[in-house]
Image: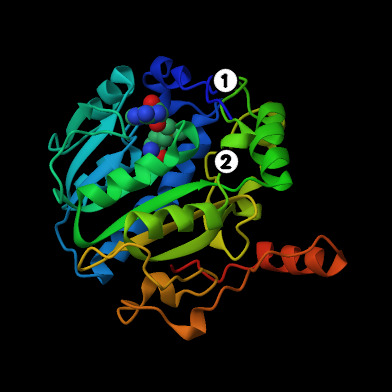
Amino acid sequence: MSSARINNSVYNTLGDRWYQAYDDPIALLRAESRLLGPWILKTMREKELLSPHVIDLGCGGGFISNFLARNDCQVTGVDLSLESLEVARKYDETSKVRYLQRDVCKTGFPDKSFDVAVSCDVLEHVENPRLVVEEARRLLKPGGLFFFHTFNRTLLSKLVTIKLVEVLVKNTPRYLHVHSMFIQPKELETWCLRAGFSSCVFFGVRPSLASLLDPSVFRGVVPKNLAFKFCKSMLNSYAGFAVGNLERKPLGARRWFGGNCAAGSSKKSGGGDASLAPPNPPLPICPKWLTHYLRSFLQTPCSKA
Ligand SMILES: C[S@@+](CC[C@H](N)C(=O)[O-])C[C@H]1O[C@@H](n2cnc3c(N)ncnc32)[C@H](O)[C@@H]1O
């Protein structure tokens, strides 16, 4: 699939709308960052990374970078969009984030420069996301963490993340997302393990249905209180993290799938755990699957992940 169609230039024109607009899909990203930022911070603290050096790969307007900087992290945010970096800098209350124009596939920093790498809503915007995973692995110190959020390549994500957003949210450009660039968790897991990460944890992410029940939705405006939460189902979008090997050993053996808070929240979760066996193996399309899916989509087992 060629990435030629994806509209990455839309981020250059947002200006303050990164932080202020509700009549724009950027408000969805902003709401999502209110889940992801605190989750990343909490996970880092659980792993005893107390003032880590973080690289935010594809930081955009700096939602996550600026949040982490306010919470005692040393942050470097990189993005191709100079205009977005300018906004990110403007909204950095600490004035401590180092914002630089770099390609996420080739940042140019030395090996092992960072404790943590973050790439939220970026993998599905680049032609070869595997290179981003490899770059994150290269940049991390042994045992470092790579956090991500992206969209699964399913019929549901095509309907919800592409079609429904185009219909419901004002100012959604065409090709904000390209379905064939979405990534299945299995693919991402393989790339992580091949790059030399030892394990991966995945959690489904979805909007809170209660926060969607707002009349503004019918005016093409994203509700101000829109909230995202973790869930079992990864059929639409998912987040997770990969753990760097202490010694570089590609194709590590362990993996976790979410659906269990322990993976992201327990101090003891430094290794694989048989109780974290994948709850969501590939499911056939049948009524049983539908029941399973609806049940898992509505549950929030990882809200504390
Ligand atoms: C959907 S935004 C996500 C921004 C941010 N990570 C967040 O969660 O708010 C995608 C960002 O990826 C950036 N981007 C796309 N391709 C890139 C590349 N090859 N190198 C650096 N940044 C890139 C875009 O400029 C845009 O800011």
Rendered residue at 26%/21% (across/down): 86
Residue 5: mark in rendering: 1
Residue marked by disc 2: 182
Name the amino acid, label 2.
Phe
Q: Is residue 278 left or right of residue 110?
A: right
Along the polypeptide, which appears first: circle 2 or circle 1? 1
**Viewport quadrant of the C terminus:** bottom left
Inspect this view and state whether residue 133 appears: yes
Quadrant of image for the N terminus: top right
**135 lies above or below 84:** below
State the image coordinates of residue 244 (x, y, percent, origin top left): 28, 62
Q: Secondary structure at mark 1?
A: loop
The image quadrant that residue 59 belongs to is: top left
Q: Residues within 10 Å of mark 1 (few under 14, many from 20)?
A: few
Marks 2/1: CA–CA distance: 14 Å
Task: Name the residue rendered at 72%, 68% in the picture.
Answer: 295
Query: Measured along the vertical axis of the image, is residue 158 above or below residue 49?
Result: above
Q: Is residue 144 above or below residue 288?
A: above
- The kind of residue on which mark 1 rests is Arg
Q: Where residue 218 sits in the image (x, y, percent)?
A: 72, 32
Label 2: state its secondary structure.
Answer: loop
**Where is ligand 1, by quadrant?**
top left
> In this rendering, is residue 180 above or below 187?
above
CA neighbours of label 2 inside 10 A, class few (<14), some (14 to 19), many (20+): many
Q: Position of residue 240 (x, y in %)?
A: 44, 58
User: Which color mode does the image show?
Assistant: rainbow
